[in-house]
Structure formats: structure tokens, C-alpha cells
Image (spheres, coloured by chain):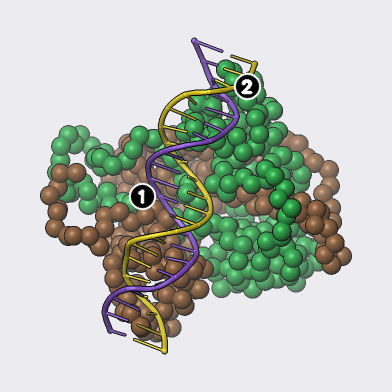
Chain colours: A green, B brown, C purple, D yellow
Amino acid sequence: MATGRTHRPATRSRGIPEATVARLPLYLRALTALSERSVPTVSSEELAAAAGVNSAKLRKDFSYLGSYGTRGVGYDVEYLVYQISRELGLTQDWPVVIVGIGNLGAALANYGGFASRGFRVAALIDADPAMAGKPVAGIPVQHTDELEAIIRDNGVSIGVIATPAGAAQQVCDRLVAAGVTSILNFAPTVLTVPDGVDVRKVDLSIELQILAFHEQRKAGEEAAADVTQAAGTTNSAVAAKREGSATDQGPDGDVPAVMPA
Amino acid sequence: MATGRTHRPATRSRGIPEATVARLPLYLRALTALSERSVPTVSSEELAAAAGVNSAKLRKDFSYLGSYGTRGVGYDVEYLVYQISRELGLTQDWPVVIVGIGNLGAALANYGGFASRGFRVAALIDADPAMAGKPVAGIPVQHTDELEAIIRDNGVSIGVIATPAGAAQQVCDRLVAAGVTSILNFAPTVLTVPDGVDVRKVDLSIELQILAFHEQRKAGEEAAADVTQAAGTTNSAVAAKREGSATDQGPDGDVPAVMPA
DNA sequence: GGATGTGAAAGACTTCACAGCT
DNA sequence: AGCTGTGAAGTCTTTCACATCC
């Protein structure tokens, strides 16, 4: 037990809102791009635009990390990159295992951004004996039998599940039993995990369905709200609604991703 | 607004909360499983468990759709499946194009759940001339040059971007110009789109970073709270920290190769 | 002057708890 | 008796707007 909601002696400040945490990677990516262009400082306005959020939100987010900016000037890019990296735990190396080396697993293994920042593919695991030894992305695939040993020998705490839905829970159970406490699930199924284990899911079909919902709504409004200016091409008139902000990308709200069981 | 649809009092609320919309696919999946097992009715408690949420939330969610349950009994599985499908716009067929047929694009094309629920892969598009004509998941890949024609001829309104980050915005612009109004972006970059176009993103690297944050927090607590039985496992080895390095799978590293986080 | 950092207000979402229907 | 549907309360998140500091 223990793990779960450990009672912490009110260690001040460590309360970064989940919504903020979910945006830190976005800021980090934008900052990294600026860094590569040798941009020394950036204002909340500029950085917010690059990250696709509004500046008030960004400043509020950063305020949870501390006062890393300079009034009248902006933020030092390199310094912020370091602070956010540290906050996200990317200054250390996280060994990761990918279970299920089908098309998706292979795509993930080949994903460059994977290795680049803090994450290292420690092993690829698949249940198919025929896959064993075969290299994918330069890493030999190992059989599921080795799962527990791999986790322990490499001190893996993050596992990626890219198996078919039917195998996901079983794989998850084994990962958790072997010591994994964070799971990124690509299988279209709800995973049940003990307290203290984080699960985030990535689900193509859910995302598409959400898009379909909005798409349908657009079509309805379009039809109902007669055709005002729509002259040329289709271009979704979509009319009203839609407030100012152009693109608050993504699953943004980050619905219920983390579910500590 | 205009549209004098002022007929219904309420209940048929036009405003289903975004958070609710994001969960409908989850409920639908759970219900479909029940349906396949020929379960006739289900209580909010049972369905909530299957979907991984709590029952109060589920009931509240359903209340936005209408009163589809029976007090003292529960919900009729088939009926709910239909209502949710309709609400999500899955009773119609959505042609989808996938742009960028690397490992990830291929994985998406092969994804079964794709075709099953209202979505149909209308075309696969890639910029590599060598890919043209080559079948992936039984569908011949077409060259980017054909993009506009494909969108128009098939009435595609949903596009999936699985290209490297560097090509994503350009592809996005072309999709939008051709009439696409919903985009699912797998490339690790912020897309800018005109008003009225929805973008959702799926980003491996962001998800991993969020997990790393929580993982780090756990480790800190563990250390602070010390003791616990523990013993085995642990010692995250944490080798040296790697810096940048320009990995990048050269050959069709497919997906987002560049752009770390 | 100019941009950050932040209380306070507004809004969105979740949870509670129970009235109301079967 | 059992379970849904929902106002109300509680919590989290976003936005505002301005005092504060370089």
C-alpha cells in the first residue's frame, strides 16, 4: 500500500495543477525551438502564441513554478528550458519498455522524439516468438517471457502498451507487478490498476469520435443558419460561437487521462 | 443564432459539455461490449465501472442527452448505443484521409476500430513518389499531388496527419483549403488553423512527459516518506544523462522524427 | 514604458445527496 | 426497494485586470 495518497507534510508549493502540468511539455517544445534559433528571451505573449495558448494562462502556469521571468523583459529561454525540464523530471533518464511490436509499436520505437528528451527505449517486447531477436529501430525484440526480468534489470518504471485490446490488461498487470508505476496505453480498452499507478491513454478512435461530434454539429448549424456570405469554396462558415482564441489545440482539456485507479 | 428553432423547452440542450462529449466514446465502447454479450440493461453503477468513471458523473453526462434510463431499472443497452451513436454522429459514414504513411500512418490505416465505427479510410496519401500505388492495409497509397482532388471527390471532412513535424502545417493548410474541417494531428507540432476548423492532437512525447512528472513526484515522496518495505525493485539505475544527440531514424523514420519535445 | 506575477471574478466540471419515478 | 435525474455545493481551471518591478 502506501504509495497512493501519501500524506505529505504539507510540503508547500508542490501543488502544480494538473492542467498546468499537461501544458508544460508544450511550452518546453516551443522553448526548445526558440533555443535552437538562439533566441535569448521571449515574452509571455510570444511564447504563448508559439505554444498555442493565451498569455494569461501561460503566465499563471509559470507562476506555479516560481518567478522565472523578468518584468518588462520576458523570460530567459535557456533558463526556462532548464526549469521546466527539471520540473517535468526530464533531467534524468527514463528507461521505457514498449510492449506489443506491431505496426504501432514499431512506429513508437522509431519515434525520434522518444530518445531525444529524457526517454530511452530500454526494450521492445512482443508475445510472438517469431519476433524474438528481430531488430526494430535497431533494438532486438524480446519475448514476453522476459518481461519481468527486463523491468527489474533496467529499473523501468514507465511502460507503453501497444498490444491488441485483448492482451492489454494482462500485460498491464504484469508490468505493474514487476514494478512499473506509469503506463501509457494505446490499446482501446480501460485498464484497471492499483492505487499509485498512473495510466494515460491515447485512443485514436475516441479522438475521431469527438471530431465527428463537432463535425456533425457544424453541419447542422451550417444548414440551419442559412447561407450568408458563403460564396466560394466550401469553407466551413460555421458562423458564430467560437470565441476569440483561434486554436486552443487538442484534447486540450485533457479529459480524464490520469486515473490513479 | 437566428434559426428560430425555439421549439424545445430544454432537455434537448444544445450545449453538451466538452468533457461529457469526450466520455461518450468511452461509454459507447463499454455499451457495445455489453451489447455483444447480449446484456439487455445496465445500471449506471455497472456501466460506470466498465467505462472507468464514477456513476454520478455518468448519470450527469447522460442527463445532457436526455432521459434515456428507467428509474429503478437502469438503461437499455441497445437503445443507449443508438442514442450515443447518433449524438456522436456515428450513424453516418465519415470518410477520412490519412496523410503520411510511415510506420504510424500504416498502423493507423491498419487499425481495425477505424472502419468499425462510422469511419472509413477513403485514401492514404504520402509525399514519397516511391510509395505511390503501393498498397497499405489493402488501400493503394496516393501521392500528395492528388490531395485536393481526393478530398473533393470523396467529400472528406476529417483528415489525419501522421507526417513528420516539419510537413504538418503545410499538409494541414492544404487539407483545410480543400475543405477539411476536422483534423487529428499526430505530428508533434502546434497547428494553426482558421476559425471553424477543429484540431485535436495526439502526442506521445507529451504524454510521456506528463507521466515522467508524476513519476518523479512519486519518487520524491517515496524518498521523503522513506521506509516502506520496498527492498527489491527500485533503484532506478539512472545512468548518466544523455544530451541532445541527433538520433533521428534516417529512413522513413515515419512519424514525427524531428522536433523533440 | 513594458511585461511579469497574482488576487479576484468568472466559468467549467465533478461530486453530493436526495427527490421522484418505476 | 431500487435506481435515475438533477439542483446545489464543492473543486478545479481560465480569464481578467492591475499592482509591481525592471
**Quadrant location of residue A116?**
top right
B161 or A20, nearer to the observer: A20
Proximity of marks 1 and 2: CB atoms separated by less than 8 Å: no
Q: The numbered mark 1 sits on a residue in which chain?
A: B
Residue B100 in picture, x, y percent from top left: 48, 45
Q: In which quarter of the image is the N terminus of chain B?
A: top left
Residues at marks 1 and 2, CA–CA distance in whole angstroms:
43 Å
- Residue matched to label 2: A70
Give the crowd class for mark 2: few <14, some 14-19, many >=20 residues within 10 Å.
Answer: few
Residue B261 in picture, x, y percent from top left: 62, 39
Tag in front: 1 or 2:
2
A173 or A9, nearer to the observer: A9
D7 or A253, nearer to the observer: D7
- Residue matched to label 1: B158
Give the crowd class for mark 1: few <14, some 14-19, many >=20 residues within 10 Å.
Answer: many
Residue A47 in picture, x, y percent from top left: 54, 28
